Image (cartoon, coloured by chain):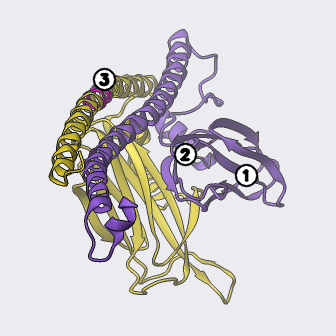
Chain colours: A purple, B yellow
Amino acid sequence: MLGLSLPTFLISIIFLLKQIGASELTFELPDNAKECFHEKLKVGSKFTLEYQVVTGGNYDVDLELKSPSEKILYKETKKQYDQIEKTVEEDGVYVFCFSNEFSTITHKVIYIDWKVDGDPEHEISGPGPKVAAGALTMIESNVARIHENLEQAIDYQTHHRLREATGRARAEDLRERVQIWSLGQFILIIIVAIGTVLLLRSFFTDRRTGSSMAWNR
Amino acid sequence: MYTQFKILLIICFLQLIPVSHTLYFHISETERKCFIEEMPDDTLVIGKYKVELFDEKTNGYLPSTPGIGMHVEVKDPDDKIVLSKLYTNEGRFTFTSHTPGEHVICLYSNSTAWFGGQKLRVHLDIDIGEHAIDYERVGAQEKLTELQLRVRQLLDQVEQITKEQNYQRYREERFRATSESTNSRVLWWSLAQLIVLVIAGFWQMRHLKGFFEAKKLV
């Protein structure tokens, strides 16, 4: 232990002590489907779940978050965006389920950001206890503040990107629909014009039996 | 010095052991699960997964099952396959995006069943861009102090923000192009429909006039 340099010691302590994870996923939820995610958590850790519906229908989804003892910690229907922060009170597997069962035709694309206590590979030693005595120097605390602000900026950027993706998907869908419906109407106009003339002609065409005579009477 | 090296080796070895506490979900053997990741170009993506098979005897999931492999297929925004490999029940895949846009990462097992099949538990962790950088390894490799490591992290984050902003500009351009295309389509189709209606009207009148004249009804 004595031969170790400080960084190695710090890193090894942090790595061995913390059990952490972070996941950012975007997936498609088909209509009438339910998608569940699980994670095993320990008492004392904190988790944050952020979700946003990116495309699909009315941009809403149901979410249910259950603790290991089947207690419902969060249950909301038809929401587009929300952020849930909770402290773990029981050891075990926590599960959250997204449900699109209320929709019969539209499938939704959902973005989730699941963070548990930070990320060991991403965070360099957190604001935890320092082996060196004394408070953080000014540079270190400023650097930590900048890091937090940048994390916030990246988070805002992600949400901005998702909202833009929503708008763009709508615009592209509109473009396709305009094309298809306009083409359909165009063809329909031609068919109806020709059809009307043919129908009218058929009224006045002589048939072998006395239908024309019936007209003349 | 040697003990330090040994400790680092042990840490590296521990890193190789997959983190058992990641998000997981259940799929059936024949199901294909896809995740969409929108990212700017030149972004590194590292994905780690672990598959467990449901065992009826213990009513749980076996930690490691030989024979179950997972296909990982990554498609870029132009629907070209960037990565398509078969890994064992535990794998780590990496790729760098060359085109900005939506990449689709699909996982499916190499099961030969036609449908249904057993349930699988898949632990998955996808890290994109600056999340994919392992600072402990960087610090160990380049022997940086903690402050230097933190500054390096700030640099990476700022670079990520810049790339994302650039990507945002590219997306807005596409959005604008789409809107302008819709605008011109509406204009031209409306014009075309108007002309067709007028022509159809004239044609109908002329044709019927000729028809009735021929029939000596007019």
Tag 1, which secondary structure? Answer: strand
Counting other residues with Cα less than 10 Å from the Cα at mark 1, is it few (<14), some (14-19), or many (20 or more)? Answer: some
Residue underneath mark 1: A64
Identify which residue, A20 or B78, lies in the foreground: B78
> Tag 1, which chain?
A
Taking the image as drawn, is residue A118 in sight? yes
Counting other residues with Cα less than 10 Å from the Cα at mark 2, is it few (<14), some (14-19), or many (20 or more)? Answer: few
Residue type highlighted by circle 3: Arg
Identify which residue, B47 or B83, lies in the foreground: B83
- Which residues are drawn in magenta? B175-184
Specify the principal SS of the magenta part.
helix
Vertical relation: A197 (above or below) A151? below
Looking at the rendered structure, whether the residues under marks 3 and 2 are on a common chain is answered as no
Asked if residue B180 lies in the magenta stretch, the reply is yes
Circles 1 and 2: CB atoms closer than 8 Å? no
Q: Quadrant of the C terminus of chain B?
A: top left
> Tag 3, which chain?
B
Vertical relation: B120 (above or below) A179? below
Residue at figure coordinates x 28%, y 67% from the top left: B85
Residue type highlighted by circle 2: Gly
